[in-house]
Amino acid sequence: MTRLNLADPVTQRRVKAVGVVVLLAVAVWLPTYYVPYRVFQFTTVLVYAIAVLGLGLLTGYNGQISLGHGAFYAVGAYTTAILMEAGLPYVLAIPPAAALTFVLGFGLGIPALRLHGPYLALVTLGVAAVTPPLLKRFSGLTGGSMGLSVTKPAAPEWSGLANDQWLYYLVLVFAVGMFVLARNLVHSRAGRAMIAIRDDELAARTMGIPLARVKTRAFAWSAMYAGVAGGLSTWVIGFLSPDSFAVAVSIQFLAALVVGGLGTIFGPLFGAAFLVFIPNVSQDINDAAPGIAFGALLILAMYVAPGGVAGLLRKGWIRLITATAPRPESRPPADPPSPPPAGTVAPADPSADDGLTVDAEQ
Amino acid sequence: MELFLQQVISGLASGAIYASLAVALVLIYRSTDILNFAQGEMAMFSTYIVWQLLQNGAPYWLAVGITLVASFLAGIAIERVIIRPVEGKPELIVVIVTIGLFILINALAGYIWSFQVRGVPSPWVARNIALGGVRVSVSTLGILAAVALVVGLLFVLFAKTRLGLVLRAAAENPEASRLVGIRVGWMLALGWGLAAAVGALSGILVAPILFLDPNMMLSVLIFAFAAATLGGFESPGGAVLGGLIVGVTENLAATYVDAIGADLKIIVPMLLIVAVLLVRPQGLFGHARIERA
């Protein structure tokens, strides 16, 4: 058997394709094995992952900090719930939520053009803070503090699935779609423009990238992701109230993004898993233990692993490539240097590195 | 008219509380260029220390004194241990570290003291004094006096003492300060210490009104950010004035604008922040930053 040559881009792509297939297979298998409560948790991971991925498009790939994505999540959730109340089939209740949050995101993106870094964080924090009282105020529509409850989607007869499994697979379909969309987006012209702006706004402008258009659209896409996730959360939980959309939600999204990996596609999945399972492990110690873990992880990540979990995985991957690469003298002299890995864990573009301080050792 | 004056005066009291937290934000921003999202949580934690000391039977003002000193030391420690490694790093990293600090301190308080809501006794007599037809509560006057005292002391420190001069120099021009032998690192840490102490005051003063729980300071923080934005992030005096303006505006808006009312007060600072940042980003007393590319 020949030795796997990971320095070969084609092999790399194959290895990564296998990785994605395995991941998908595991995702499909999970609900057949675990008890309903676990399945519910996995579904929640997928929902959070979509929201965190959306935040990642904005913060990780475009460099705009948002502490207010909980607001878009809330709008998505309420839109879906209200439409379902009005009798719309649950699947049809998601696209309007997506459209509305897209527009709202675009709207918030306009003042955001004039706010940089911490100031944008500040304004979006304000948006998150006014969300619960606003929801309470429009009680005719939102049910006020009492909240709204909706009937969870039930599994159709033909599927032969239990309700929790059906819900999981529905959300999985959305999640896969949204991840593919995000991956394609960041690898497209628009995505490269987003990354260029993040890395150097002035240089990007000099290159003729229309700053305002790219940044407001990034905001709109990002908000739409949060909105869709919010809508799906309505399906999963079946109940929503203003207090479930407190500022903490927005902060958790950012925490999950950073811990999972800024500027990566799969990082949000790890981050979302952390959000769901860290409380699970640590809540036995104390109610506050998850917060302590998250706060400490966030600070530590900035010191030692600004690329988060996904960044660490990528480092490992690059080390693996270097370790398995054929020795330089055995390589034909005309061989170009091996391009950085493409696909699953790492975006193909080397500039799509998170742009913070991680530098994979060469 | 009487209602109006009453609202203005009680607005000044809450404004003074915002002002003290805003001054803390400004002290840190001036010296280290950081918007400290954890400032409110630091103040909340300090307030818990007061509460704990009171539970253990300490007299009120002694408890406050001990807490202010402890907060000062803790502020220095936070700067040296947690903030120092990321100073000068990209904004995103710095913001995330202060958010991490926010989550960490919030959870630590919950861990130690639980998320249960606690009453904190008010140091002021529950009485009203008539001042030219308007009745003013002693607590309002007390809050105003306490904030005025602390801000006054800070002013004396910064404007009249050698240490204050050194502190300002270190914030203004770190490199030149280092050349003349100022230990800039310690001066920045000292700035954080002072900020922690002034911020703690806001938590201590607001606790009898809002009741103490780990999430108490979030709305105060947003009001304080509005105050600092309005006054200009580089000007402590501006932050004080900004705080008072925000406090009064908030109270009047809640009283006279039906669409806002008591439940939507939080939208006032939010709109103020957006308006100021978009129209006059340097605030009332800040200097416009000229960017040279």
Image (spheres, rainbow, N blue to C red):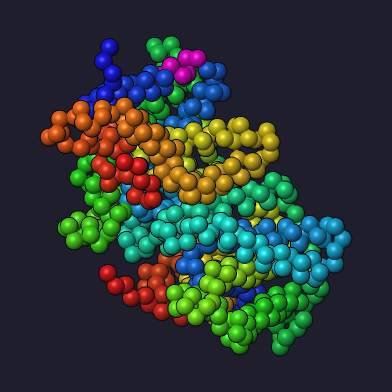
Relative to B35, say whether B161 is above or below: below
Q: Mostly what secondary structure, the magenta segment?
A: helix
B219 or A63, nearer to the observer: A63
Quarter of the picture holding the C terminus of chain A: top left
A169 or B54, nearer to the observer: B54
Q: Please report the residue visible at 72 percent of the width from the left and 68 percent of the height from the top.
A: B69
The image quarter in which residue A287 lies: top right
Quarter of the picture holding the N terminus of chain A: top left
Relative to A201, say whether A161 is above or below: above
The image quarter in which residue A10 lies: top left
Residue B84 magenta-drawn? no
Residue A320 appears anywhere in the view:
yes
Relative to A239, say whether A173 is above or below: above
Residue B249 appears anywhere in the view:
no
Residue A30 magenta-drawn? yes
Q: Which residues are magenta?
A: A28-33
Measured as percent of width and height from the top left, residue A268 is found at 42, 38
Measured as percent of width and height from the top left, residue B67 is found at 74, 65
Measured as percent of width and height from the top left, residue B291 is found at 32, 72
- Please identify the residue farthest to the right as the structure is shown: B57
